[in-house]
Image (cartoon, grey):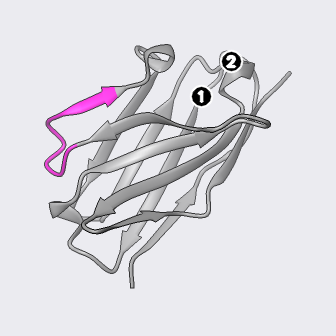
Amino acid sequence: QVQLVESGGGLVQPGGSLRLSCAASGFTFSSAGMNWYRQAPGKGREVVATISNTGDIVSYKESVKGRFTISRDNAKSTVYLQMDSVTPEDTAVYYCNCYLFPQEFWGRGTQVTVSS
């Protein structure tokens, strides 16, 4: 079955960096676009970054442009989110996501806390 397993979250100071990973299995990873979402306390889930199946098309939420970078390694069936210059507003649970018609799949999430 489809599995998405996030890792790499933790506590980081403002201005610091963190790299999230999402290991995928149970489907043909190289055929699927992948997404990172986040959900902050008391807020709805929002898309942060997306990447096409080949990795040549990416998009970002406006507030993370220039700070976050999404990438993927199809040989390892893994998608990454490099987070730089983080701020307390980046504190959230980060989720890996993909849409494989007709279903949508989610990982369990990894907590990122930005605090001094």
Q: Residues within 10 Å of mark 1 (few under 14, many from 20)?
A: some
Magenta highlight on residue 53: yes
Where, by quadrant of the figure, is residue 66 drawn? top left
Q: CA distance from mark 2 to mark 1?
A: 10 Å
Residue 57: image x %, image y %?
17, 34
Q: Nearer the viewer, residue 12 or 38?
A: 38
Count of marks, rendered view: 2
Q: Residues within 10 Å of mark 2 (few under 14, many from 20)?
A: some
Q: Is residue 82 magenta?
A: no
In terms of secondary structure, where does tag 2 sit? loop
Assign the N terminus to one quadrant of the image: bottom left
Relative to 3, say whether 61 is above or below: above
Left/right of residue 19 with respect to residue 99 in the rendered view: right
Q: Which residues are magenta?
A: 52-59
Give the mark nearest the N terminus, 2 or 1: 1
Farthest bottom residue in view: 1
Q: Are marks 2 and 1 in contact (CB under 8 Å)?
A: no
**Residue depicted at x 71% and y 35%:** 40
Q: Taking 55 as reference, is 85 left or right?
A: right
- Relative horizontal placement of residue 46, taking residue 2 as reference (left or right): right
For residue 87, the mark is: 2
Residue, disc 1: 17
**In front of the other: 27 or 45:** 45
Q: Secondary structure at mark 1?
A: loop
Instruction: Find residue 97 and report its horizontal and vertical position in percent.
Output: 43, 55
Q: Amino acid at mark 2?
A: Thr
Farthest front residue in view? 102
Most common SS among magenta residues: loop
Up-down relation of residue 60 to residue 52 (above or below): above
Query: x and y percent of residue 113 in the render?
Result: 76, 35
Question: Residue at the location (53% across, 23% down)?
Answer: 84
